Amino acid sequence: MVKFLREHMEKAGCGVGENFLKAVNCNKKIAGGYVRGEGIMVCSNHMNTQDDVNQVVIHELIHAYDDCRAANLDWANCAHHACSEIRAGHLSGDCHYKRELLRGYMKLRGHEQDCVKRRVMKSMFANPYCSKAAAKDAMEAVWDVCYNDTQPFDRAP
């Protein structure tokens, strides 16, 4: 999946250089992040398994892909940020039922969308431009369009 996303970023005109992915020690309790112009950081001090690393890289590559394909993406715009978080949560496998079970969330129906919404809000709370209410409103406003946007995949993996 990482290779697939990297190839599609290159096809979209956004090369992924050697220093695009970095393992770093993070003070904040986060798994990683994407910063335009800097690339992806993985908080190695918060990773326990290779699968954790893979998930963070895939999630952040979806943000990088979104940033690449949308010329006007503004991370300070709550709706733009929410859309990319919805896509990353839905397409990366972050909310696979096995992962949710390991996190202690047990629900048979609708778990994936609930998980995506929960994780979008968690990420949005870290955006200084989005209040709790603005983040929730933005997520609800863009949900259908962004949840159903599976590019560069044919369908949700």
Image: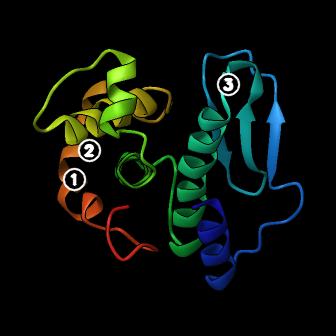
Residue 80 appears left or right of 69 = left
Q: Quadrant of residue 108?
A: top left
Label 2, label 3: how far apart the Cα atoms are:
28 Å
Residue at image x 29%, y 60%? Answer: 146
The colouring scheme, among rainbow, by chain, secondary structure or one colour, is: rainbow
Q: How many marks?
A: 3
> Where residue 38 sits: x, y (%)?
78, 51
Do the residues bearing badges 2 and 1 touch, measured as CB atoms within 8 Å? yes
Name the residue at the right extreme: 18
Q: Residues within 10 Å of mark 3 (few under 14, many from 20)?
A: some
Q: Quadrant of the N terminus?
A: bottom right
Say the numbered circle drawn on residue 143. 1
Inspect the image, locate mark 1, and give the three-letter code of the amino acid beneath it.
Answer: Trp
Q: Is residue 140 above or below residue 102?
A: below
Given residues 103 and 22, the one toward you in this image is 103
> Where residue 3 sits: x, y (%)?
66, 66
- According to the image, label 2 marks what residue? 139
Q: Quadrant of the C terminus?
A: bottom left
Label 2, label 1: how far apart the Cα atoms are:
6 Å
> Where residue 11 sits: x, y (%)?
64, 84
Q: Residues within 10 Å of mark 2 (few under 14, many from 20)?
A: many
Residue 134, visible in the rendered structure: no
Q: Is residue 12 above or below residue 94?
A: below
Please tell me whether mark 2 or mark 3 is closer to you in this view: 3
Residue at image x 30%, y 39%? Answer: 116
Residue at image x 51%, y 57%? Answer: 74
Q: Is residue 43 above or below residue 13?
A: above
The kind of secondary structure element at disc 3 is loop
Inspect the image, locate mark 2, and give the three-letter code of the amino acid beneath it.
Answer: Met
The kind of secondary structure element at disc 2 is helix
Say the numbered circle drawn on residue 47. 3
